[in-house]
């Protein structure tokens, strides 16, 4: 019989907690999944762990045992009482009752690195699925001083995040994740590993943040705008999608650029790798700045 399942049911009963679906509350009750998340996070006493959405504290306990410092960010006030009751005796525990999207993570990491003996910051979370993408994008695009991000998310989203750009199952977000990190799948997690059971299968993934840039591009923001434009109309050819969204001034300009880069003018966005988008960006940049 699972220990965490018993513990979760006990805590929910004690505090009279019903999961709030609109906050994406699916509490993890599978011991093996907890072990895998903790193990793959590769935590040391010099680590700051930021846990997003600790909920009842299922992952928090192990994080506190292994990390130098754990900062939990939880939106639901009801969880705050529970977490304080459970963990206030740990002197490496801090709790922020906020929407994670509103927290200044730059400042938080900087402060922790300046004080104590923290050398690395890592994210560990069983994320609320209704805001998975905004959270991951914030963590990556803000270029936080992070080592890794280990998260449980919806399987369908996970597959898109860890796909290789230019291969299958990609979306605009695949390129961002690839640009900022090396992504890998840790494990698939079935619905019955949670109370209540979500409607979807889950997956734990790990993003190791890249230390060095993998491509040369004159304007990174411009490149990601172009990628988003290309995928907004992904059923069209890349040429048409980029003409329609005014990335290319007209078809002739677009055709010339694709020809110059040796790309088929009938190619679709999902066939391009990150380098291809960097090349297109560099060409457009040259045209605009000449
Ligand atoms: N970590 C717990 C576990 O594994 O059982 C709970 C995970 S549950 C999938 C997601 C948690 O994120 C919930 O506790 C929920 O209240 C919290 N949450 C939802 N939206 C949030 C937000 N915007 N900022 C911070 N936490 C949020």
Image: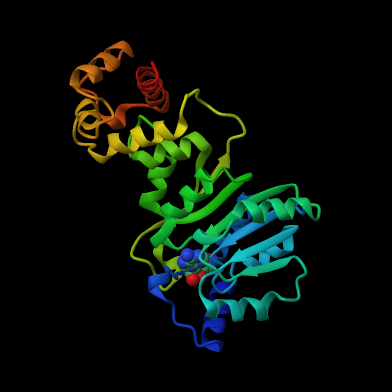
Q: List x then y, in percent, for residue 105.
A: 60, 54
At 64% from the left edge and 69% from the top edge, which residue is drawn? 95
Q: Is residue 250 above or below residue 100?
A: above
Q: Is residue 69 above or below residue 79?
A: above
Q: Does any portion of residue 30 appear in the rendered image?
A: no
Q: Residue furthest front?
A: 290
Q: Nearer the viewer, residue 181 or 137?
A: 137
Tag count: 0
Q: Is residue 100 left or right of residue 270?
A: right
| Residue 183 spot, x, y in % from top left | 50, 40
Point out the image quarter for the N terminus: bottom right
Q: Nearer the viewer, residue 210 or 290?
A: 290
- Residue 234 falls in which quadrant of the image? top left
Quarter of the picture holding the C terminus: top left
- Residue 260 lies in quadrant: top left
Q: Residue at x 74, y 51 (%)?
A: 113
In-image side of 214 versus 260 (left or right): right
**How far across and down, in percent of the image, does residue 89 sit?**
76, 76
- The residue located at (36%, 39%) in the rendering is 172
Answer with left or right where residue 73 lies relative to residue 62: left
User: Residue 267 location, x and y as percent?
Assistant: 24, 24
> How is colour applied across the structure in the image?
rainbow
Q: Is residue 66 visible?
A: yes
Q: Does 171 sit above or below residue 86?
A: above
């Amino acid at each position: 019989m699972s220990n965490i399942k018993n513990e979760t049911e006990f805590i929910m009963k004690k505090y009279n907690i019903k999961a709030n679906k609109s906050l994406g509350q699916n509490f993890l009750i599978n011991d093996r999944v907890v072990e895998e998340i903790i193990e793959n996070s590769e935590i040391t006493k010099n680590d700051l762990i930021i846990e997003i959405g600790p909920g009842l504290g299922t992952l928090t306990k192990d994080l506190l045992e292994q990390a130098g410092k754990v900062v939990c960010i939880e939106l639901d006030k009801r969880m705050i009482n529970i977490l304080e009751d459970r963990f206030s005796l740990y002197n490496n525990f801090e709790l922020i009752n906020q929407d994670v999207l509103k927290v200044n993570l730059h400042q938080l990491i900087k402060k922790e690195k300046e004080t104590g003996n923290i050398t690395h910051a890592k994210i560990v979370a069983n994320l609320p699925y209704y805001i998975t993408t905004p959270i991951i994008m914030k963590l990556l695009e803000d270029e936080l001083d992070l080592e890794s991000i280990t998260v449980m998310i919806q399987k369908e989203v996970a597959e898109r995040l860890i796909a290789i750009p230019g291969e299958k199952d990609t979306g605009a977000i695949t390129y961002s994740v690839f640009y900022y990190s090396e992504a890998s799948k840790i494990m698939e997690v079935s619905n019955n590993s949670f109370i209540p059971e979500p409607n979807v299968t889950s997956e734990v993934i790990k993003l190791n943040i890249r230390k060095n840039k993998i491509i040369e591009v004159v304007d990174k923001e411009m490149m990601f705008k172009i990628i988003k434009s290309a995928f907004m109309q992904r059923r069209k050819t890349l040429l048409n999608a980029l003409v329609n969204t005014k990335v290319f001034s007209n078809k002739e300009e677009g055709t010339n650029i694709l020809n110059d880069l040796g790309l088929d003018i009938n190619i679709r966005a999902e066939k391009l790798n990150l380098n291809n988008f960097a090349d297109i960006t560099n060409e457009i940049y040259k045209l605009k700045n000449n």
